[in-house]
């Protein structure tokens, strides 16, 4: 049985209809302003967003519309200038950086446009990091199974530089799912890949999302990819201009 | 257990638990995989500095321990008394009754004749009576020669004399009016206090035989030594007190140990500064390596933080790496230092005055390793502190490390503490390092400050080079030059580290070379045409005409002739010497000194009157004689024109009134004196005459020496050329030792250069590959690299040279008192060498850039 089909890990997420009633991720009046010398640049303002457990949503918009900033704030990678964020029932702005890191390690998975594998670690070592950070050792078998599931059973001890872009992103997918996160943030996951390479990655992303019941927040430029998500959120100039209806994702 | 269960050993948020967490160590090991070689190259810089520091500290410790345990055998007695005059028999009896045994020695410099070789030369003669040394041993070849000598059977000589004149044991030498057989050669000499033996070989005979030679008459240049065995320290103090007015010098084993200790302190102090600099340079190199390493790892750290790694755990990963690097470097440096210590002892053990133990001084090793470790750690804390401000959001965006500082309440305060703590610890370590290596605390702080200024200047110069490259390079310049020079200011440039390492190495090496040059130039300046190079000493009044005739016969000029009188000061301006000593206003050596003075009607070419008149000064006192005093002694005595100095001229009181103050150029080897009198008054006082001459170019002093030995055996011919050669040779040896230690600084510099080139290599290779991809030829790429490395080497060498020259000008003017514009070839050579070194190292480490497929290189770079 594939490891990702194991469903007994939802201890922090409400199940069934409760999911809809109590959002996994919620933002209110979220804003982010950067100061550059005497100038202030507002990249995000008054963003209200809710993502339920297991839901998939795509954030689209032109460059500079604040998509990645929103993703970073929701994942606790940055602190908002205004408003609040609640993730897994916890207000992020009340947590210090280490607490946020702990929360990320427990609940969040990431897939980056530029893969962001640690170049000095092999594929399997990269995948194991989220578990190792939580003190869970001896999970090599699970990591190997997961890498096999994404088609890299023969690449376990390869370094990132020895893998193609598509393979690196598959390692990143395995790393994102190894600790069965409640929510996965994906920032342009196929942005650095060609169409042929992108297709299986997208399929895996959604398959893993569905199998694990993980919520997916996806930032993309690609309308076709966005349409695969259960909901499409459009952004422009730091604001949400539309939030599509929830529907069954691909 | 599910991954969502709360694990018991998650990566800790606190630093100390993080440092012992297995994941941190695993990550530190994994993360170092691609960087180990590069980090180890930098570590070599610390290894090099610490090797020198450990070796120097260990050598000092070993010799000091040996001196401590053998202090008595270094002196050969429990008390040594030295006097210019013959020790009166009643005083001798009074002193020797307090000891178990005693021995006497008269030491004089005299000509020795070698009839077999029909030659003669100046030797240091030691006439010994008694079983000296009481402690330690004297070794001769054959073994019984020393006892035969003490029994009056002949002389024992230094082997060099036998070699020089092709003599054998049993051959005859002449000394004064005596002919003596050679009994043997000295393998290990008896302890001695005479420093003249560096310039003249030693010859030992019994005191009785020496007196028979007629060379030890009143007024001759010699010392009388009395050695006492088993004398109570209380009695030693009493003797010192009782005979304080005799002009005797006293020395106990403790005094000798202390004086050797001072020499060792100076040895450690001087060489320690250089090796300390090498260590600091090495630590800077390691800090640079860690900084570059972390710059590469910033994204990885951000990713780790995204994945839930606490900031302190990420910090701990790199702290562990750094600590291991510092520890390995320190252990290697300490170990190599011990090997060097052993090697030096093996080479020089027979030349040392004491038997040294070959056992490594473990305490010194441990302390040196700890010092190296702490200094290294102090330097890397600053770059490491950057880790704590790496934001996880950097994983999302390609932000530069400058923009990744987290914002948040109180963060600026934390950052400030980190930024203050690391430099504070660094400063503390530097001061500790200086104080632990330099016994004089004031000087230690001075050295740290001086070193700090040099480093600050080098850093400012590097900034100037970076800014200069940015502003000077013009778009109209040829592309290759533009590209090469622009690399000096572009991101990830190596300019600062290069200027620091290569510049500091060049500065140190050039300073040593210039100091050596100044000293050698000073010596060579003395050898100009009109200067004497032979001193004829101890010419008695009845021999003056004969020696003058001899010189005329050999067609040698009589340059100067000066009668010598020995005298001591008894009071200054009516204040007795004892009272002056108690006051402490006048340097003690001036009050204790036996002045060799003279009288003459005029001044020589190296003297200038700066106050009063000579020789016809007006005397205020009726019973006084006119005295011309050298200006520095006048300052020491705080006297001026008209002041009275009371003198004791070999028992006869003399009241002298200062009628002029003279400035003397002591660097010339003319006959000059602190005290000069007018002729007439002292003509009948006991003394001797010194005459000077000059051997014409192409001739040697051999014939003069041979005839002197034959006709005037008591007259010594001191050949200045030989002395200058000896001084030069000693200088060369000292310079070699210094250069050897400076070599470690250079090794540190080279290791840093290699490391920084390896750091910059990725960037340069990426650029080169891009250029090749865009159609650049191998020649063009190599030209760009060549220009960059040549500029780095040139500017670093030039920076070090300019600073060294800046230090040399005042040094030459005020310390060496020589021409400041000499030795200009050295900075040119050093700058050229630095440029060549940089080019060679740069091109060596860039090999393969033009021969491998671009894709292969790009892929391999991606993994680092």
Image (cartoon, coloured by chain):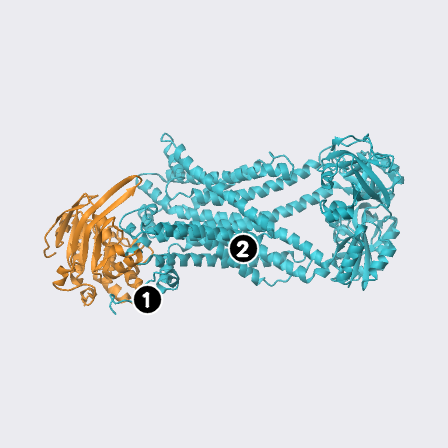
Chain colours: A orange, B cyan
Residue at x-position 53% and y-position 37%: B802
Q: Judging from the image, what secondary structure is the residue with disc 2 in?
A: helix
- The mark tally for this picture is 2
**In the displayed structure, would residue B578 be above or below residue B679?**
below
Pick the front one: B644 or B524:
B644
- For the N terminus of chain B, which image quadrant? bottom left
* Location of mark 2 (residue): B51
The chain to which mark 2 is attached is: B
Q: Which of marks 1 and 2 is in front?
A: 1
Dot 1 crowding, Cα within 10 Å, few <14, some 14–19, many 20+? some
Q: Is residue B531 left or right of residue B622?
A: left
Q: Position of residue B316 (x, y in %)?
A: 38, 58
Q: Looking at the image, can residue B703 be seen?
A: no
Q: In this view, does B773 lie to the left or right of B816?
A: left
Q: Is residue B29 left or right of residue B620?
A: left
Q: Position of residue A186 (x, y in %)?
A: 21, 53
Q: Judging from the image, what secondary structure is the residue with disc 1 in?
A: loop
Q: Looking at the image, can residue B697 be seen?
A: yes
Dot 2 crowding, Cα within 10 Å, few <14, some 14–19, many 20+? many
* Location of mark 1 (residue): B9
**In the displayed structure, would residue B775 be above or below residue B31?**
above
Give the numbered dot on residue B559. none
The chain to which mark 1 is attached is: B
Point out the tag, 1 or 2, that comes first from the N-terminus.
1
- Residue B348: quadrant of the picture: bottom right
Pick the front one: A159 or B400:
B400
Residue furthest to the bottom in view is: B1
- Residue B205: quadrant of the picture: bottom right
Q: Do discs 1 and 2 belong to a common subunit?
A: yes
Q: Where is residue B463 in the image (x, y as percent from the top left)?
A: 43, 39
């Amino acid at each position: 049985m594939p490891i990702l089909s194991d469903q007994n890990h939802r201890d922090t997420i409400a199940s069934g209809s409760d999911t809809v009633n109590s959002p996994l991720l919620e933002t209110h009046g979220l804003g982010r302003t950067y100061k550059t010398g005497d100038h202030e640049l507002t990249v995000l303002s008054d963003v209200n967003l809710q993502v339920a457990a297991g839901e998939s949503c795509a954030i689209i918009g032109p460059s500079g519309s604040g998509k990645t900033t929103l993703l970073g704030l929701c994942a606790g990678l940055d602190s908002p200038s205004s408003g609040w964020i609640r993730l897994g029932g916890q207000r992020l702005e009340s947590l210090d950086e280490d607490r946020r890191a702990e929360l990320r390690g427990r609940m969040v998975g990431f897939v980056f446009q530029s893969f962001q594998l640690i170049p000095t670690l092999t594929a399997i070592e990269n995948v194991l990091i989220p578990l190792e950070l939580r003190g869970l050792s001896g999970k090599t078998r699970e990591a190997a199974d997961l890498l096999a599931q994404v088609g890299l059973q023969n690449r376990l001890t390869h370094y990132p530089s020895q893998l193609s872009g598509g393979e690196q992103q598959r390692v990143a997918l395995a790393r994102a799912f190894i600790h069965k996160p409640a929510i996965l943030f994906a920032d342009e996951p196929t942005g650095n890949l060609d169409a042929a390479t992108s297709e299986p990655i997208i399929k895996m992303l959604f398959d893993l999302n569905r199998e694990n019941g993980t919520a997916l927040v996806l930032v993309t430029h690609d309308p076709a990819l966005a349409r695969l998500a259960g909901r499409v959120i459009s952004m422009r100039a730091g604001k949400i201009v539309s939030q599509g209806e929830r529907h069954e994702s691909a | 257990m599910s991954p969502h269960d709360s694990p018991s050993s998650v990566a800790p948020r606190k630093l100390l638990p993080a440092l012992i967490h297995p994941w941190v160590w695993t990550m530190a090991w994994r993360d170092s995989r691609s960087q180990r070689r590069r980090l180890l190259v930098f570590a070599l810089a610390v290894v090099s500095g610490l090797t020198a520091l450990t070796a120097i500290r260990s050598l000092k410790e070993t010799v000091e321990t040996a001196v401590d345990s053998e202090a008595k055998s270094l002196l050969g007695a429990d008390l040594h008394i030295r006097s210019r005059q013959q020790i009166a028999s009643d005083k001798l009896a009074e002193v020797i009754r307090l000891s178990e045994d005693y021995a006497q020695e008269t030491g004089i410099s005299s000509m020795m004749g070698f009839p077999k070789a029909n030659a003669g030369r100046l030797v240091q003669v030691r006439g010994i009576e008694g079983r000296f040394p009481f402690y330690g041993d004297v070794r001769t070849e054959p073994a019984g020669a020393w006892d035969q000598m003490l029994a009056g059977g002949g002389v024992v000589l230094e082997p060099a004399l036998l070699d020089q004149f092709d003599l054998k044991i049993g051959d005859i030498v002449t000394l004064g009016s005596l002919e003596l057989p050679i009994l043997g050669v000295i393998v290990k000499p008896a302890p001695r206090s005479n420093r003249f033996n560096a310039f003249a070989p030693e010859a030992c005979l019994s005191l009785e035989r020496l007196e028979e030679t007629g060379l030890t008459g009143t007024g001759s240049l010699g010392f009388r030594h009395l050695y006492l065995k088993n004398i109570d320290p209380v009695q030693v103090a009493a003797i010192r007190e009782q005979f304080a007015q005799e002009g005797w010098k006293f020395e106990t084993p403790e005094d000798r140990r202390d004086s050797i200790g001072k020499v060792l302190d100076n040895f450690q102090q001087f060489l320690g500064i250089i090796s300390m600099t090498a260590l600091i340079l090495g630590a800077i190199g390691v800090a640079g390596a860690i900084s570059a390493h972390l710059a590469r790892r910033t994204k990885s750290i951000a990713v780790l933080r995204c994945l839930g790694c606490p900031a302190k755990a990420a910090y701990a990963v790199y702290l562990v790496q750094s600590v291991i690097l510092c520890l390995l470097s320190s252990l290697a440096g300490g170990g190599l230092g011990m090997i060097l210590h052993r090697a030096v002892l093996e080479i020089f053990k027979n030349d040392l005055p004491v038997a040294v133990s070959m056992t490594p001084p473990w305490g010194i090793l441990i302390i040196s390793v700890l010092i190296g470790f702490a200094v290294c750690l102090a330097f890397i804390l600053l770059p490491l502190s950057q880790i704590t401000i790496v934001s996880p959001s950097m994983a999302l965006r390609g932000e530069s490390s400058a923009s990744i500082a987290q914002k948040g309440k109180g963060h600026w305060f934390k950052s400030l503490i980190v930024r203050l703590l690391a430099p504070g610890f660094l400063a503390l370590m530097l001061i500790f390092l200086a104080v632990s290596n330099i016994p004089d605390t004031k000087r230690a702080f001075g050295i740290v400050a001086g070193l700090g200024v040099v480093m600050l200047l080098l850093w400012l110069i590097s900034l100037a080079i970076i800014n200069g490259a940015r502003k000077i390079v013009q778009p109209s310049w040829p592309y290759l030059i533009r590209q090469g020079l622009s690399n000096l200011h572009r991101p990830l440039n190596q300019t600062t580290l290069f200027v620091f390492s290569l510049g500091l190495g060049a500065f140190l090496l050039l300073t040593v070379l210039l100091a050596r040059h100044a000293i050698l130039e000073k010596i060579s300046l003395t050898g100009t045409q009109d200067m004497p190079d032979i001193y004829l000493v101890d010419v008695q009044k009845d021999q003056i005409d004969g020696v003058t005739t001899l010189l005329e016969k050999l067609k040698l000029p009589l340059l100067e002739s000066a009668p010598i009188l020995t005298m001591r000061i008894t009071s200054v301006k009516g204040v007795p010497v004892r009272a002056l000593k108690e006051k402490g206003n006048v340097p003690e050596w001036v009050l204790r000194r036996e002045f060799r003075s003279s009288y003459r009607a005029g001044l020589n070419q190296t003297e200038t009157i700066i106050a009063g008149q000579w020789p016809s000064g007006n005397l205020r006192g009726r019973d006084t004689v006119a005295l011309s005093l050298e200006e520095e002694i006048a300052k020491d005595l705080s006297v001026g024109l008209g002041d009275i100095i009371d003198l004791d001229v070999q028992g006869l009181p003399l009241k002298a009134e200062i009628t002029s103050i003279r400035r003397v150029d002591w660097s010339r080897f003319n006959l000059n004196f602190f005290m000069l009198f007018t002729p007439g008054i002292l003509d009948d006082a006991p003394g001797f005459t010194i005459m000077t001459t000059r051997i014409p170019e192409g001739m040697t002093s051999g014939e003069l020496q041979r005839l002197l030995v034959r006709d005037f055996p008591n007259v010594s011919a001191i050949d200045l050329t030989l002395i200058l050669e000896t001084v030069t040779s000693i200088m060369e040896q000292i310079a070699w030792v210094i250069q050897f230690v400076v070599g470690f600084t250079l090794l540190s510099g080279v290791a840093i250069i290699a490391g920084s080139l390896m750091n910059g290599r990725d960037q340069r290779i990426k650029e080169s590959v891009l250029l090749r991809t865009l159609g650049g030829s191998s020649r063009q790429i190599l030209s760009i690299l060549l220009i960059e490395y040549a500029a780095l080497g040139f500017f670093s060498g030039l920076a070090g040279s300019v600073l060294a020259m800046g230090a040399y000008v005042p040094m030459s003017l005020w310390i060496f008192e020589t021409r400041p514009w000499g030795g200009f070839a050295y900075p040119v050579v050093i700058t050229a060498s630095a440029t060549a070194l940089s080019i060679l190292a740069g091109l060596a480490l860039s090999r393969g850039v033009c021969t491998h497929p671009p894709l292969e290189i790009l892929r391999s770079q991606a993994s680092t």
